[in-house]
């Protein structure tokens, strides 16, 4: 419920797997560089999909939402890549949180 630029603003990172180079070039950046680029103390929510991945409908919704914010400074929602591998849900969660911990080791 926070407004951009305020202390209670939270960035939603939609974590997706099986990303290709084209996906990254189209705005689905890798998770660690995105996390490093966030403002200090910026709050983050990580959305990780179910076992077997997001449905086709969910992927289409994410593509539509994330395409609105490509090129914007500090977008409230970003699609990020967890890499090209297919991950178990538990592994994807650990990878996303581990990426956050790696970039916020203070």
Image: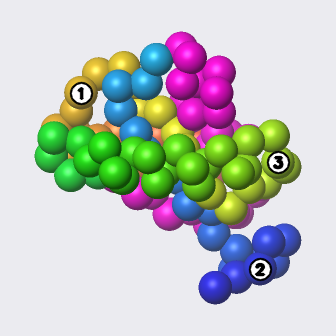
Q: Tag 3's secondary structure?
A: loop
Which colour style is shown? rainbow
- Where does the image place residue 54, in percent across and percent down from the top left? 28, 46
Instruction: Determine the residue positioned at 84% across, 49% down.
Output: 73
Q: Mark 2 points at which residue?
A: 3
Reply above or below: 47 against 22.
below
- Mark 3 to mark 2: distance in Å? 16 Å
Q: Name the residue under label 3.
A: 72
The reply to whether dot 2 and dot 1 touch (C-beta < 8 Å) is: no
- Where does the image place residue 87, in percent across and percent down from the top left? 22, 33
- Where does the image place residue 56, in percent across and percent down from the top left? 31, 44
Q: Tag 1's secondary structure?
A: loop
Q: Which mark is residue 86?
A: 1
Instruction: Determine the residue positioned at 70% across, 74% down.
Output: 9
Reply above or below: 31 against 83.
below
How dense is the environment of label 2, judged by Cα within 10 Å: few (below 14), some, or many (20 and up)?
few
Q: What stretch is highlighted in magenta?
A: 21-48
- Mark 1 to mark 3: distance in Å? 29 Å
Residue 18 appears in which quarter of the rendering?
top left
- Where does the image place residue 74, in percent across and percent down from the top left? 78, 54
Q: Tag 2's secondary structure?
A: loop
Residue 47 appears in which quarter of the rendering?
bottom left
């Amino acid at each position: 419920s926070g407004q951009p630029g305020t202390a209670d603003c939270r960035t939603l990172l939609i974590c997706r797997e099986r990303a290709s180079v084209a996906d990254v070039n189209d705005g689905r950046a890798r998770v660690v560089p995105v996390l490093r680029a966030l403002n200090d103390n910026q709050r983050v929510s990580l959305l990780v999909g179910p076992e077997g991945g997001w449905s086709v409908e969910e992927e289409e919704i994410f593509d539509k939402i994330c395409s609105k914010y490509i090129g914007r400074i500090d977008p409230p929602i970003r699609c990020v890549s967890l890499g090209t591998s297919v991950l178990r849900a538990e592994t994807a969660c650990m990878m996303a949180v581990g990426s956050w911990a790696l970039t916020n080791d203070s």
